[in-house]
Amino acid sequence: MYKSFNRKLQKDIIVIQPGEYYVVDRTPEGIATVLGSCIAVCFMDAELGIGGMNHFMLPGDFRNDEVFASRSSRYGMFAMESIINEMMKKGARRDRLTAKIFGGGHVLNFRKSDGNIPLANINFVKTYLQYEEIPIIASDIGGDTGRKIIFIPSEGGRVLVKKLLKSPDQAMEQENKYKAAVLNTKKEDVSGGVTIFTKGDIRDDKE
């Protein structure tokens, strides 16, 4: 995680890496990440202007009926509960949260024994949010490209999305390292500058 100043947006941007999350508490800074097969969820309590983003990958395949049982789902649940709890510490209310979801592209190489992890990531986040009754108000998921996203809670939860025809080497190297760490984990329980978008390269999820 690091901070960079985006001259085009005239904002400080917190860049999160795979396995990280960050919460903005009524401040103008944005949150950014680059996604391949991972998922990012942008949570928002619009009434208080508190928003947060995470970036995670499940360590295995997932079926909808395993949301509270499997090792794979518990990894995702930790990623979700960590950021929600942090937002609540800052005053957000769980019953006011909305979510925007991104990622799950087929851009990394997985072993056949790993299953369809991008699809498992997408199924997990949809199932989790449905169980928790947190509405998904926007999404850009699946496909075969990476994505750069910038989440700006101070602008009503606006998200800028850039599709990557070829994923940046450094960003995908980070996600590949994260994938290796996640898939090699033996644990049952898991705890514990920004690219400037040029005109024509970005899509506003509100448009």
Image: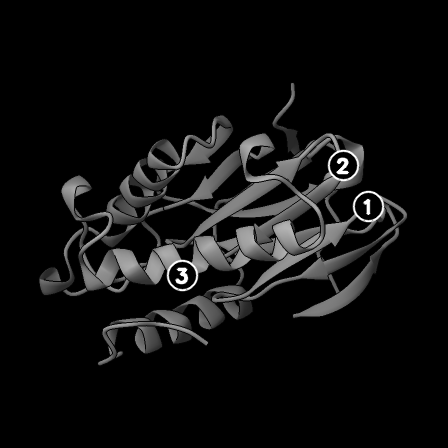
Q: Is residue 57 visible?
A: no
Question: Dot 1 lies on which element?
Answer: loop
Q: Position of residue 75 (x, y in %)?
A: 33, 63
| Along the viewing direction, whichever of 74 and 170 lies nearer the viewer | 74
Question: Which of the two discs, 3 and 1, labels the residue nearer the N terminus?
Answer: 1
Question: Dot 2 lies on which element?
Answer: loop
Q: Local crowd at mark 1 within 10 Å, few (<14), some, or many (≥20)? A: few
Q: Mark 3 and mark 1 in contact? Answer it, CB < 8 Å.
A: no
Q: Position of residue 174 (x, y in %)?
A: 48, 71
Q: Mark 2 and mark 1 in contact? Answer it, CB < 8 Å.
A: yes
Residue bearing mark 2: 48
Q: Callout 2, which amino acid?
A: Leu
How far is disc 2 from disc 1 in space, using C-alphas?
A: 7 Å
The residue sitting at 30% across, 37% down in the picture is 127
The residue sitting at 21% across, 64% down in the picture is 71
| Along the viewing direction, whichever of 173 and 121 lies nearer the viewer | 121
Q: Is residue 105 visible?
A: yes
| Along the viewing direction, whichever of 172 and 63 lies nearer the viewer | 63
Q: Residue furthest top?
A: 207
137 left or right, relative to 31: left
In the figure, residue 197 lies in which quadrant?
top right
Give the total number of marks visible in the rendering: 3
- Observer-side mark, 2 or 1, equals 2
Question: Which of the two discs, 2 and 1, labels the residue nearer the N terminus?
Answer: 1
As drawn, the label of residue 185 is none
As drawn, the label of residue 26 is 1
Residue bearing mark 3: 78
Q: Callout 1, which amino acid?
A: Arg
Question: Which of the two discs, 3 and 2, labels the residue nearer the N terminus?
Answer: 2
How far is disc 3 from disc 1 in space, using C-alphas?
A: 24 Å
Q: Local crowd at mark 3 within 10 Å, few (<14), some, or many (≥20)? A: some
